Image (cartoon, coloured by chain):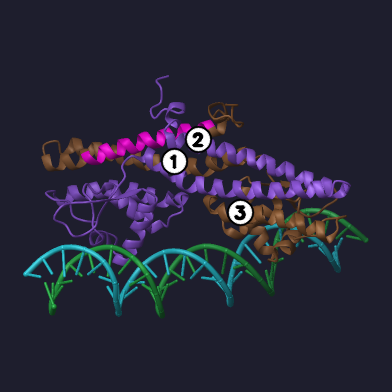
Chain colours: A purple, B brown, C cyan, D green
DNA sequence: CTGTTCGTACAGTAAATTCTGTACAAAGTT
DNA sequence: AACTTTGTACAGAATTTACTGTACGAACAG
């Protein structure tokens, strides 16, 4: 933790205590995003920084090597949770959190869930066409047909699900989700 | 992989090939649900089983120890991806996948994301009230006020986000999400 | 009551992941 | 040009996680 300018030690500690609770809550739940606890912790730290941070500053604050900071911050940038920013005069790379968490959430789904969804759909479609071919080829064989039809039914339902998931993700990407579920709760 | 009854070896292998592609696609993307690849693979295996399976059968099919099957299947049951079923006469526990993937998706969010959301909201609210107290206590100190107000603004925005996330998850739990994003794409 | 059979707790091992320090390429400074 | 500074690739160490085999309690059978 860095000292904050112009505050007494007592004030400083009171703020840090309140921050720490949040940073740790964030760090603990970041596994949902598939990132490690320490990377989550770094995210929390950056969240309360009111100016962009360098790798050296992160290393000092986290008491970890610069190498670790480099890899951790890269995963956060890849997930679009953290942005690299430019500041004239500085040769060092600077990073700050993306403060729009709605956007962060949408980007995450767009990136990860979309990718998984596409891959599964691809496999499902390919296997479906193989099964259909098999079904035609052995049209007479009852035992075989029964087996293939059972598999096909499951595959079709899975395709239906992933198609839906794709449409859901699309609402995240387009921002339409906020028309369906508004950012602010309507007054009851 | 188990033999399927009443089919020739050729038929058997053709089906298994088509299944394998899907099972592996599923296993590879299951990290999104925070489960290991091997647990994901087990899920894929169960998906194509047309009858409930015992731990011993799983172990044989996956070429893994029964202990591993026990723990793997437990995580799947905890996530409600797999159900324990009863069959009269059998002393062994039997398991089969939940075939309704829409439900599986909803349950997962309900379980994991809801939990994270609640924990973060709790931390945020507690720290917010602490900060408000601090702000009142040091009302004169300008440097301090500036710092606290900056933190409070971030906290409020985070609370706004998590409140939204809770409402989104609620639509999953209630099934209202399918009114907003229908299971089947409307004909264009 | 004495056998079995079944599932899982637990401890130890194997494997994978995370973290560190060194080394070096790229870019900037003098 | 030579000399710094900065970020990251890479290899090894440290830590964590996944997997296995043994052991044992619970439930059932005879």
Where residue B169 is drawn, which disc sits there? 2
Q: Residue at x 75, y 46 (%)?
A: A132
Q: Closer to the camera: disc 1 or disc 3?
A: 3
- Callout 2 touching callout 1 (CB < 8 Å): yes
Query: Which stretch is magenta?
Result: B150-171
Circle nearer the N terminus (1, 3): 3
Q: CA distance from mark 2 to mark 1?
A: 10 Å
In depth, the one of A128 and A86 nearer the eye is A128
In the picture, the quarter occupied by the N terminus of chain A is: bottom left
Q: Chain of mark 3?
A: B
Please check the rendered image and state whether residue B162 is part of the magenta-colored stretch, yes or no: yes
Q: CA distance from mark 3 to mark 2?
A: 26 Å
Q: Where's residue B153, x and y in %?
A: 26, 37
Whether residue B150 is situated above or below residue A120 in the rendered picture = above
Q: Does the image show residue B99?
A: no
The residue pinned by badge 1 equals: B117
In depth, the one of A141 and B61 nearer the eye is A141
Q: Where's residue A23, x and y in %?
A: 33, 49
Q: Residue furthest top?
A: A188
Q: CA distance from mark 1 to mark 3?
A: 29 Å
Q: Closer to the camera: disc 3 or disc 2?
A: 3
Mark 2 element type: helix
Judged left or right of residue B93, residue A101 is: left
Q: Residue at x 35, y 57 (%)?
A: A74
In depth, the one of D23 and B174 nearer the eye is B174
The residue pinned by badge 3 equals: B25
Q: Where's residue A91, x and y in %?
A: 18, 60
Circle nearer the N terminus (3, 2): 3
């Amino acid at each position: 933790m860095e000292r904050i300018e112009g505050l007494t030690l007592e004030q400083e500690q009171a703020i840090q205590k309140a921050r720490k609770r949040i940073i740790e809550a964030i760090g603990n739940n970041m596994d949902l995003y598939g990132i490690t606890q320490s990377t989550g912790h770094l995210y929390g730290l950056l969240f309360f920084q009111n100016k962009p941070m360098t790798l050296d500053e992160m290393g000092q604050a986290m008491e970890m090597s610069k190498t670790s900071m480099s890899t951790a911050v890269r995963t956060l940038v890849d997930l679009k949770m953290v942005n690299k920013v430019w500041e004239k005069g500085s040769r060092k790379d600077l990073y700050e959190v993306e403060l729009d968490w709605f956007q962060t959430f949408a980007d995450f789904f767009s990136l990860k869930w979309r990718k998984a969804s596409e891959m599964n759909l691809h496999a499902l479609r390919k296997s479906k066409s193989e099964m259909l071919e098999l079904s035609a080829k052995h049209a007479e064989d009852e035992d075989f047909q029964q087996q293939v039809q059972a598999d096909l039914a499951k595959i079709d339902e899975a395709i239906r699900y992933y198609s839906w998931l794709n449409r859901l993700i699309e609402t995240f990407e387009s921002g339409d989700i906020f028309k369906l579920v508004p950012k602010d709760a309507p007054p009851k």
